[in-house]
Amino acid sequence: MTQCGRAHPPGRAGYPSPVTVVTSVNVNGVRAAAKKGFLEWLSATRADVICLQEVRCEPGQLPVELRELPGWHAVWAPAATKGRAGVALLSRKAPERTAIGFGSAEFDNSGRYVEIDLPGMTVASLYLPSGEVGTERQDEKERFMAEFLVHLTELRQRAAEDGREVVVCGDWNIAHREADLKNWKANQKNAGFLPEERAWLTRVLDEAGYVDVVRQLHPDQVGPYSWWSYRGRAFDNDSGWRIDYQIASPGLAERAVKAYVERAATHEERWSDHAPVTAVFDHRF
Amino acid sequence: MTQCGRAHPPGRAGYPSPVTVVTSVNVNGVRAAAKKGFLEWLSATRADVICLQEVRCEPGQLPVELRELPGWHAVWAPAATKGRAGVALLSRKAPERTAIGFGSAEFDNSGRYVEIDLPGMTVASLYLPSGEVGTERQDEKERFMAEFLVHLTELRQRAAEDGREVVVCGDWNIAHREADLKNWKANQKNAGFLPEERAWLTRVLDEAGYVDVVRQLHPDQVGPYSWWSYRGRAFDNDSGWRIDYQIASPGLAERAVKAYVERAATHEERWSDHAPVTAVFDHRF
DNA sequence: CCTCGGAGG
DNA sequence: CCTCTGAGG
């Protein structure tokens, strides 16, 4: 682990480094992404923790460049079905604890959730099912949402008791508000912007007590979108959706000093249909 | 039809042009081939008739560049199963007759045989099943061979009665003799070089009365191979097989003045794992 | 318009 | 190591 210390003043107790940079990105197939520029982005990023979704690869299928990531500790949580879903967590520091799944009989092997403890904070990578209205896949999404809300509530409580902070990053596959997608009117009956999905996200914030880190720092901005369909000219027209979030405990969220979408990361050579969502937490404040 | 006459003396009765150039090539997916150089090869070829195999495309799926081939008449014979097999015939002159299949209940819809009549000669495009020892697909290959030998015999007889010549071109998926593949010893138990397959090809020549045009003109040559696996470095090592043949009636075969494999056609940018097999028939002799 | 699996080659 | 499906996105 060759991560070098940066020129920051000392942080608060429990945070060995005064600043933690967290990034989340749905890579849409980590092997394909690696061939198109993901590795260059990775070698340039200043993130301390990276949450990946849609890895779509069993650990045994990873090419060397991905199996051996110098400077990183990796936890891979593939789906039982080959080539589907799959999440991972990369961290510069070794995790104190690792957990795959959130205690769900149905979803723990579906490659949709992995959680690690780092000094003072828990970081999770989430890939919520994408759903499609009128299909069994929408029912699955709803079952996931119901179970996962319980987990989020318990996670917050446990963390609070332990004096830890929490951030759940990933592809939530729901745009929360009208400002979170280009064409909200046309999408009110489409999966990803259904009233019940939006209401569920509101409950994540209001009832489970989390904060949408990007929105907190940019309350009046349109977007910033994090996903643009590969179909048509969605990216060029910025016809996107904000469906990738960092959802943090209030104590962590209030330490967020920056939060943004790295749209340019996938601009020149597009290596995913999602862009990285990054937050900088400064533990000195 | 903009095919211009060439500076040849007049041919024999029944052959409006004194020379007929016939090419056969397995394109391994005509859409993929078109993106990689097949169209450039096509625009440069001097062939009068082209037999294609493994077109792997329904006529409705053809991109414009393939749907509209100026100067060519095309007959497409796709397989019932999408993306599989499929043969076609392109001719500068309009066919006098077109037939898909050879009267087989099992195989007429399998995209493996199409036949046209041109002035004085019948040209067929064949894609014989490839087979694999110990599988149902080898049984299928053998059933095809049995039925097809009957057809070849009848085809010759009918043609002789009508005073026509015949050439059946295509991917026969059998190397006939030891000189027809790089590593014959190691392949004696593999589909494509089984004793019974080789014996069947001998019957095509000796019993049904056809001539292997390339071998006739190059009796002592190793190969020339017409297919090199995409696996490993088969092409670079010239580790190939001669499995694409022009099998002609004796009266036509004796008019062959040239017969060769266009290995260079797929050398620079490889657009198929097979190379075109071309024969020039001169009707003045 | 992508990525992946699997069949067929 | 190719080219196709078809599912999932």
Image (tube, coloured by chain):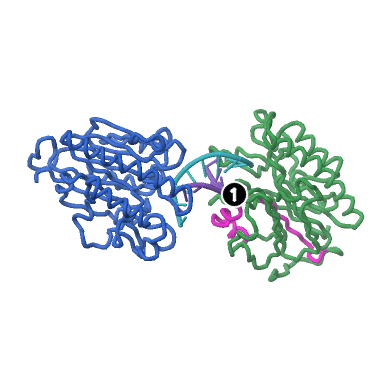
Chain colours: A green, B blue, C purple, D cyan
- Report which quarter residue A49 is drawn in: bottom right
Q: Quadrant of residue A41?
A: bottom right
Q: Quadrant of the C terminus of chain A?
A: bottom right
The residue located at (29%, 46%) in the rendering is B24
Residue B97 located within the stretch drawn in magenta: no
Q: Dot 1, crowdedness within 10 Å: few (<14), some or many (≥20)?
A: many
Looking at the figure, which quarter contains the N terminus of chain A? bottom right
Closest to the observer: A124 or C5?
C5
Percent x, y of residue A228: 61, 42
The percent coordinates of residue B170 (x first, y second) are 31, 46
Q: Chain of mark 1?
A: A
Across and down, in percent, residue A131 comes to: 69, 37
The kind of residue tagged 1 is Ser
Horizontally, residue A236 falls left or right of residue A170, namely left
Q: Is residue A5 above or below residue B128?
A: below
Where A27 sits versus B104, above or below?
below
Q: Is A38 on the left or on the right of B283, as rendered?
A: right
Instruction: Depth check: give the residue in front, A220 or A81.
Output: A81
Q: Residue at x 89, y 53 (%)?
A: A158
- Horizontally, is B248 left or right of B132 in the view? left
Residue pushed farthest right? A161
Residue A120 place in picture, x, y as percent: 84, 60
Q: Secondary structure at mark 1?
A: loop
Q: Which residues are magenta?
A: A15-42
List the residue tagged with mark 1.
A272
Q: Is residue A250 left or right of residue C2?
A: right
User: Up-down: is B164 above or below B225?
Assistant: above
